Amino acid sequence: MSKLSTVCTSFYVSLFLLSVLTRLQAQPQVNYDEAKVPAYTLPAVLKTTTNRAIRNKTAWETERRPEIIRLFEENVYGQMPRSYDRLTYSVTNEDAQAMGGKATLKEVRIDVINRTKQVTIHLVLFVPNQSKGPAPVFLLINNRAKDNTDPTRIHKSDFWPAEMVVDSGYAIAAFHVSDLAPDDTIRYATGVLQLYPDQLTAPNGMRAIGAWAWGASRVLDYLEKDAAIDAKKVAVVGHSRGGKASLWAAAEDPRFAMCITNCSGNTGAALSHRRFGETIARINTTFPHWFTDNYKKFNNNEDALPVDQHMLLAAIAPRPLYATNASKDLWADPTGTFLALKQAESVYALYGLKSHLPANPPAINQPILNAPIGYHNREGEHNLTAYDWRNFIQFANLYYNRSRKRK
Ligand code: GTR
């Protein structure tokens, strides 16, 4: 190598190292120390932006709840388009003897058309054959590999333990996020956003998480037409980024009977004002295609945000809500999740619903299974596991049995 090229190479190497260093310095260190959580004031869930106190469920439903949804649309998840020209569906594969005769498999193609553009959602659904009437269902927003929801059951996974759910008397369904918005900074716009192109240029335009939640509602449009399903008992389930979407879907669409959010962390079930683990700046930098452009204003500026995630959880009331964490998943801030749930209790109380959450986070592997607010912190890593699903089923059993008795 000539002397000149050696000099050039080391010049560029130093330039590269310098830029990496500058970027690292620009990113504040991740905080995992409770003592370093800054003092913060959460926006009050039961006070309007004009500072009026909300004292009953009518005022909550007519004033504060719609205001909260608007604030989340404007600042975080973006507008949620409610109209479309047409939805059609066709069962592309049906097997009444799936899972060795235990279930009926349906693969359904759902097409949603708006302004000549179309998006196709591929739904996988297993309904227990033993079911005495229309079956309640768990609907997973699948953000992981498609083989997690393999309709052939050659590949089985605890991420979507279909056999366990069917054996418990529930139907189980799933669709993949990529049908709505590929999870990619550039390609995310190739799904639902084609149907609503104005959203792309709007500062409060929907992005990928909004598109996934929108997809869950379109699947619910289909489930309402499927006689094998009790559409009044659809639990929307999501893990991590899928759990952010399951919360937004349930908050936006009151037809979802139950919401389950697993390890959803920042801009999911955890409080952002705590700046513990993943922060708004980090999530917006790594995943700029998930939330509105407006949300970027709150990078390293949490105190200016007019909402926090406890308000999203509260918007799901009085419907049952189950949130989880994993003990080694500090990035998703288990304490911040528990605190957000505690803050939502006051809204459930407006409906006369008593929370069974303890004052402080329960010990690891000590689930709180009584509705309206369920919670557990599973031992282990960031994941969706058989342990988590067993508790979701228990939570749903307790809730549905109790509401049956009330009737
Ligand atoms: C992480 C992201 C989290 C969470 C997670 C996941 O990288 O920072 O907010 O969404 O991915 O989806 O597994």
Image: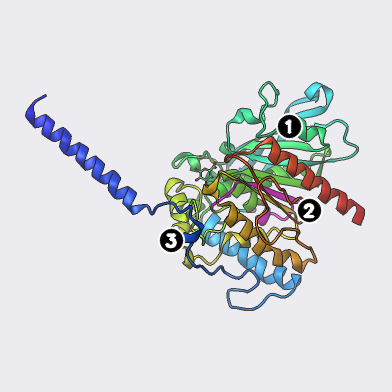
Left or right: 308 with respect to 229? left
Tell me if residue 22 can be seen. Answer: yes
Query: In the image, what residue occupies the spot 46% across and 60% down?
Result: 36
Q: Residues within 10 Å of mark 1 (few under 14, many from 20)?
A: many
The residue to which callout 1 is attached is 162
Q: Distance between the residues labelled 2 and 1?
A: 24 Å
Task: Say which of marks 2 and 3 sits in front.
Answer: 2
Q: Residues within 10 Å of mark 3 (few under 14, many from 20)?
A: some
Q: Which amino acid does label 2 sit on?
A: Asn
Vertical comparison of 227 with 39: above or below: above
What's the residue type where badge 3 is placed? Lys
Earlier in the chain: of badge 3 and badge 1, it is: 1
**Magenta region includes residue 302:** no
In the rendered image, residue 229, in percent from the top left (x then y), is placed at 81, 40
The disc label shown at residue 297, or none:
3
Q: x%, y% of residue 363?
A: 67, 50
What residue is at 8 percent from the left and 31 percent from the top? 4
Q: How is the image coloured?
A: rainbow
Work out which quarter of the rendered image holds the C terminus and state it. bottom right
**Callout 1, which amino acid?**
Ala
Label at residue 370:
2
Q: Do the residues labelled 2 and 3 touch (CB within 8 Å)?
A: no
Q: Kindly state the secondary structure of the residue where label 1 is placed.
A: helix
**Mark nearer the N terminus (2 vs 3):** 3
Relative depth, front residue between 246 and 106 = 246
In the rendered structure, which segment of residues is drawn in magenta? 250-266
